[in-house]
Amino acid sequence: MRVALVHHWFVTRGGGERVAACLGSLFPQAELFTLVAEPHAIPPGLAGRALHTSFLQRLPLARRFHRHMMPLYPAATESLDLRGFDLVLSSDSGPVKGVRVDAGATHICYCHSPMRYLYDGYEAYRAGMGGLTRGIFTATAARVRRWDVAAAGRVTNFVANSDYVAARIARWYGRESTVIAPPIDLTQARQAIPGEHYLAAGRLVPYKHTELMIVACQRLGRRLRVAGAGPELARLRRLAGPETAFLGELTTDALWNEYARCRALLFAADEDFGMVPLEAQACGRPVVAYGAGGSLETVRGSGPAATGVYFKQQTAASLAEGILAFEAAESGFDPGVAHAWAESFRTEVFLARMRAHILTVLPAAAAAMSPPPDTFAASAAQ
């Protein structure tokens, strides 16, 4: 049996790349397919495998500006040559669910999210674009959306990373999916004496709403440490006062130290799943989260086993109220309860569930699978 592992692009290392690495660990001989790739972004567990890229790889600046290549996504995806593969596993938050496979081949798509900028986030993304970019996006989005819906119809079986995403797959694609939460690398978890500051962590991009955390902490006179880099950095620096410290993009070890030492993690995104809150909880720290989307599945906001609190609206005022609500109940949060909750999302759980699901869909895949591991090396997914 020939197995192909398809991931939308390898240009940074994040949660999607961790999922791809874990899927790859199940099939050691699987070949890699992607639209564009940077060598440094290939997870160590996938390094050295046969790697196939689309024609976008040869275009100047395509790797740096891959998100601007949307009008070319359909052609680039369909240019990937998957003839002769019996099982195709795609890890997708973009277009690669649309790869062409042989008649009779099985295609299982692990969907991190339908492309938000084509569906429920269309107007918000469009409003944030410059004139030329907005014009090109407006002229081409409907065509790409139609192609994406048709491409979803060719997938044999969908797996969603959350109930939230499963509902979006059903809404936009008319397809059912099995929910399997992505893997959290708990080998990095640690605990420390927490400080008096709050933490924001993740890419500094508009939908993360880091500005809400900065403004809320300013209003309350609370210290905030911001871990991450991205295109929003300059704007956020102009907004911030002396109580906000920007840490930049941290090493894995430094980031987990920040988790362990914060008073609580602040999380303002309407996220499809959200690994960052679970990483903080793995270190015993509670989360003040926007009560929508994936956070409703990763943070327990009430009851005796609560691991955080929700705030109701994506505004600085609502987040400030959430911080005060957390502080009023702070003594009731148990680091051990938070860690135990995060344990239920550990990598081994993901691997076991994906292994069982793949064999349910295609029992013959057992011949190409690696034996069930006792543990999964953290380095393979970082």
Image (cartoon, rainbow, N blue to C red):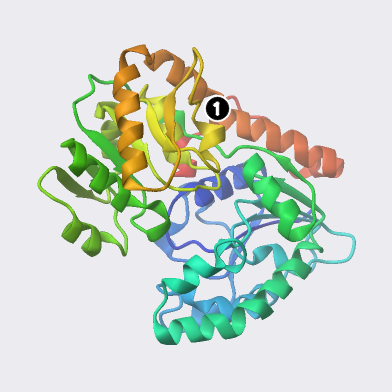
Report which quarter residue 235 is drawn in. bottom left
**Left or right: residue 73 compared with residue 353:** left
Report which quarter residue 259 is drawn in. top left
Residue drawn at (72%, 36%) of the image: 355
Q: Position of residue 217 (x, y in %)?
A: 22, 40
Q: Is residue 170 above or below residue 140?
A: above
Residue drawn at (49%, 18%) of the image: 340
Q: Is residue 207 above or below residue 123?
A: above
Q: Is residue 177 above or below residue 239?
A: above
Pick whichever, 181 or 369, lies toward us: 181
**Left or right: residue 35 compared with residue 230:** right
Whether residue 171 is visible = yes
Pick whichever, 54 or 215, lies toward us: 215
Q: Quadrant of the C terminus?
A: top left
Q: Is residue 159 above or below residue 53?
A: above
Residue drawn at (41%, 48%) of the image: 314
Q: Position of residue 178 (x, y in %)?
A: 74, 41
Numbered circles on residues, count: 1
Whether residue 376 is visible = no
- The residue to which callout 1 is attached is 375
